[in-house]
Image (tube, helix red, strand yellow):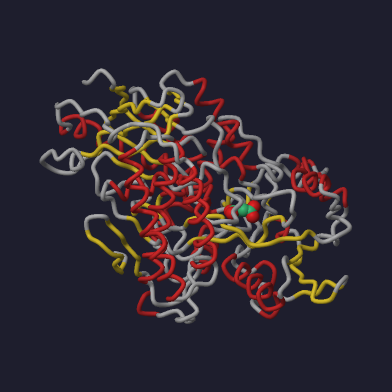
């Protein structure tokens, strides 16, 4: 072992719901030490911002079959039915586990239901594409409540050590090191932001749980950390990356000059909220009836595209979500966080419609893996949003992501428990070389980083957003190529910083989205190309797969 090497049995990269659940699931199954590395504070994550909740069959009037059907219907003929079944059916046990570690979900009693038999029952919300009420929630701060409970449980667990402000730079694989034999993940190079040093974390298993990549787009409700680090590192390690063209835009981010990135949960539409446009000043009119029979509760791809179409057609700057059919008392109780945020801005949502616009929200693509997170690289697992299991297909059903984020870690820990003896046996005994950076002098041109970053986010929004065309994708490709070339130069010529690591990751993910979108000559779910506005049934259940050592995206039928 080299001086600069930290050895753990298991390394988890990312500390949102999937990362911390992974650490806890591993701690239950293994006696070994677990490191969680995370680039900000432990709770700087996307999961914390989740408002809606976790879709799960918890009501006797609901069935697994119905949840599976709703998921597959939303998924545009691209879901893997076996993955959907495995994740949906594992849900109830994981909800119980979350409650056992102290998560407090909203009950009907909390919302004023006085019937003794209802008092302790979980309240079930509804969101777009769900034909039943099945969204378990903690008011409208579900993610924050779950994250709180997970952080507490991890902090109490002596097997888990959390490294805050440590950003993973690259995975360490035997093939990267030029070592012979089957490709195996040995850990990761990690930048300690406080010291500026890159440390080697070595481990028998490495799980990435870095969440999404909303920061690749100009308008997003994602947290600042959402830069696609896991997918970018996995791509550089030659893992297979699938379906990156299916990027989900949430239809309703708050539109207000003083507030960026604030989500207005779909759960509001689940309570009867209606989308409207102001075609004439002071007059609000519905429009979703022209787009889908489920109107404002249509699947998210349909709603986001409908709003985008209306905005472009009329030149308006925003749509509106009307909740005025509900009393202020109900809204304050059911959506306290959203109510307060609107109120601060002078919007009383019980009395006036909320201005909204679509924004980048969720990546349905990611590292191609099984529901247990397994990839083709031994010892390397992907869990949560940076994974592509086949659950979401071409369009994620609302609140299925937190479900996936709590189910996958348990399945992955089960797989790891079984394979650990073999991983130990096969691990090469050689020392891992230290990270080396080019000439390691400080750049005096840091402006280049922020300029490149802004440029990527803007052209991704304009050319690779809700509506794409071949020409727009070609333009985006030309631009990303130039930026990639600059970044490679900076990476090796200048001292490594977390900003540079994030920029490199965002650029990689942007290129993966562009290439995947360009290779899919059809429109399906979240991928809409105006040059091919129809779905091509020959591409049903066909994934777009990209791998670094096999240039270009290829279309691969699911097994
Ligand atoms: C929301 O609350 O609208 C977001 C839920 C989700 O994206 O699953």
The single residue placed furthest to the front in the displayed view is 444
Q: x%, y% of residue 79?
A: 42, 64
Judge by depth and name the residue closer to the eye, 396 or 279. 279
In this view, 66 is above or below 123: below
**Which residue is located at x 14 percent, y 27 percent?**
430
User: Which residue is depicted at the point 81% across and 60% down?
Assistant: 323
How many callouts does the rendering have?
A: 0
Quarter of the image where the C terminus is located: bottom left
Residue 110 in the image: state x and y as whole percent.
77, 40
State the image coordinates of residue 307 (x, y, percent, origin top left): 66, 70
Q: Is 200 placed above or below 380 here?
A: above
Question: Picture quarter containing residue 381?
Answer: top left
Closer to the camera, 275 or 400?
275
| Quadrant (top left, top right, bottom left, bottom right) of the N terminus | top left
Q: Is residue 375 left or right of residue 122?
A: left
Which is nearer the eye, 412 or 550? 550
Residue under the point 57% across and 48% down: 222
Q: Quadrant of residue 160?
A: top left
Q: Seen in the image, is 234 located left or right of residue 336? A: left
Farthest-out residue, left:
180
Q: Residue 14 appears at what percent x and percent y? A: 45, 37
Above or below for 384 versus 271: above
**Lateral position of residue 4 relative to residue 141, left or right:** left
The quarter of the picture where residue 44 lies is top right
């Amino acid at each position: 072992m080299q001086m600069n090497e930290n050895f753990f049995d298991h390394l988890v990269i990312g500390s949102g719901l999937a990362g911390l659940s992974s650490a806890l699931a591993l701690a239950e199954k293994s006696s070994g030490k677990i490191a969680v590395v995370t680039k900000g504070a432990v709770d700087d994550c996307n999961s914390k911002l989740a408002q809606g909740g976790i879709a799960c069959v918890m009501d006797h009037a609901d069935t697994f079959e119905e949840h599976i059907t709703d998921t597959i219907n939303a998924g545009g003929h691209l879901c893997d039915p076996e993955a959907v079944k495995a994740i949906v059916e594992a849900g109830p046990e994981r909800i119980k586990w979350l409650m056992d570690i102290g998560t407090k979900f909203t009950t009907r009693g909390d919302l004023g239901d006085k019937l003794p038999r209802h008092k302790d029952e979980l309240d079930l919300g509804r969101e777009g594409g769900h034909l039943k009420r099945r969204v378990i929630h903690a008011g409208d701060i579900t993610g924050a409540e779950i994250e709180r409970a997970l952080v507490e449980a991890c902090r109490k667990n002596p097997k888990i050590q959390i490294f805050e402000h440590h950003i993973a730079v690259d995975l360490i694989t035997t093939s990267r090191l030029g070592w012979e034999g089957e490709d195996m993940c040995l850990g990761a190079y990690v930048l300690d932001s406080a010291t500026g040093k890159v440390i080697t974390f070595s481990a028998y298993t490495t799980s990435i749980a870095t969440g999404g990549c909303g920061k690749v787009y100009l308008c997003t409700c994602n947290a600042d950390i959402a830069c696609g680090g896991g997918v970018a590192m996995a791509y550089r390690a030659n893992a297979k990356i699938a379906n990156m063209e299916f990027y989900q835009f949430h239809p309703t981010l708050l539109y207000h000059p003083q507030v960026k990135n604030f989500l207005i949960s779909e759960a509001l539409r689940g309570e009867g909220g209606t989308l409207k446009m102001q075609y004439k000043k002071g007059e609000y009119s519905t429009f979703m009836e022209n787009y889908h029979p489920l109107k404002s509760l249509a699947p998210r791809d349909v709603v986001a595209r409908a709003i985008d179409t209306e905005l472009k057609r009329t030149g308006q700057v925003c749509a509106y979500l009307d909740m005025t059919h509900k009393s202020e008392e109900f809204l304050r109780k059911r959506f306290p966080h959203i109510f307060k945020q609107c109120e601060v801005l002078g919007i009383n949502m019980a009395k006036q419609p909320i201005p909204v616009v679509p924004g980048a929200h969720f990546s349905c693509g990611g590292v191609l893996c099984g529901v247990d997170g397994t990839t083709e690289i031994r010892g390397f697992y992907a869990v949560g949003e940076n994974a592509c299991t086949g659950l979401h297909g071409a369009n994620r059903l609302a609140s299925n992501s937190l479900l996936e984020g709590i189910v996958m870690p348990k399945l992955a820990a089960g797989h790891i428990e079984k394979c650990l003896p073999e991983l130990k046996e096969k691990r090469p005994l050689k020392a891992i070389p230290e990270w080396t950076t080019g000439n390691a002098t400080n750049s005096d041109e840091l402006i280049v980083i922020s300029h490149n970053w802004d440029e990527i986010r803007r052209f991704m929004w304009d050319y690779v957003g809700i509506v794409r065309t071949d020409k727009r994708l070609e333009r985006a490709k030309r631009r990303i190529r130039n930026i990639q070339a600059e970044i490679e130069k900076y990476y090796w010529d200048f001292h490594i910083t977390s900003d540079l690591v994030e920029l490199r990751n965002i650029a990689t993910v942007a290129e993966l989205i562009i290439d995947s979108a360009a290779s899919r000559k059809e429109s399906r779910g979240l991928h809409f190309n105006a040059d091919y506005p129809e779905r091509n049934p020959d591409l049903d259940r066909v994934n777009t797969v990209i791998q670094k050592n096999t240039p270009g995206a290829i279309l691969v039928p699911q097994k």
